Image (tube, rainbow, N blue to C red):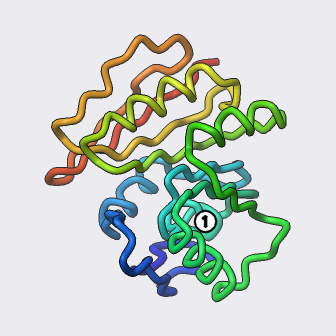
Amino acid sequence: MRIIGGEYRSRLIEMPKGAQIRPTQDRVREAVFNVLADVNGRRVLDLFAGSGAYGIEALSRGASYATFVENNSRCLEVIVSNISSLEIPESKYTILRSSAYMALSRLEKDGEQFDLIFVDPPYHKDMAKKCLLYIDYYDILRQAGLVVVEHFKADSLEADLETLVPEKERKYGDTVITIFKKPV
């Protein structure tokens, strides 16, 4: 897998071996960042980080800070390795070993706020919808902030959300990217 754009463009990152993850295809990640356009200066949260590809791509394109949340120890080792191989300064990221749900609660308690949240959970488990509900509940997304959810085409994200509004949806085979916004 490679970084698509920015400072680390064309650099390869490794994928966790033996971990049950589904890496986002380069073309899907590229399409997501084309839709987002400018991530310069944004604070990013990468939930279910896997290899860290979304967060690293955002940092490569000028995001000011990324928080990676992952519960799998093999994936955590790979995230650390990828960040190290790219020589990303420690002042630009945090890595949390935690479930996504526990991390969201902790981040709110710590007063963290993000401009952009990537949610890429395992398919077929309603985890994407559950994460949306948690993000909607916890005050961690800044006004005008975006939540990018990668999910299986048959997985419904229909939920009673109070602060998040669906903005865009793109389909790439079995993968769907749905973007939610927190209106001003």
Q: Quadrant of the C terminus?
A: top right
The relative height of residue 159 versus residue 28 in the rendered view (above or below) is: above
Instruction: Compare residues 12 and 132 and report the one nearer the observer.
Output: 132
Residue found at x 52% / y 80%: 9
Q: Quadrant of the N terminus?
A: bottom left
Can you identify the residue that label 1 sits on?
Answer: 61
Residue 107: horizontal and vertical position, in percent? 74, 39
Q: Amino acid at mark 1?
A: Arg
Residue 143: horizontal and vertical position, in percent? 67, 25
Residue found at x 42% / y 50%: 120
Residue 101: horizontal and vertical position, in percent? 57, 37
The relative height of residue 125 versus residue 98 in the rendered view (above or below) is: above
Residue 54: horizontal and vertical position, in percent? 51, 61
Residue found at x 78% / y 38%: 112
- The answer to which image quadrant residue 76 occupies is bottom right
Instruction: Compare residues 29 and 119 and report the one nearer the observer.
Output: 119
> Would residue 44 appear left or right of 36 to someone viewing this image?
right
Tell me the SS state at disc 1. loop
> Would residue 178 appear left or right of 153 to someone viewing this image?
right
Instruction: Compare residues 141 and 68 and report the one nearer the observer.
Output: 68
- The answer to which image quadrant residue 130 occupies is top left
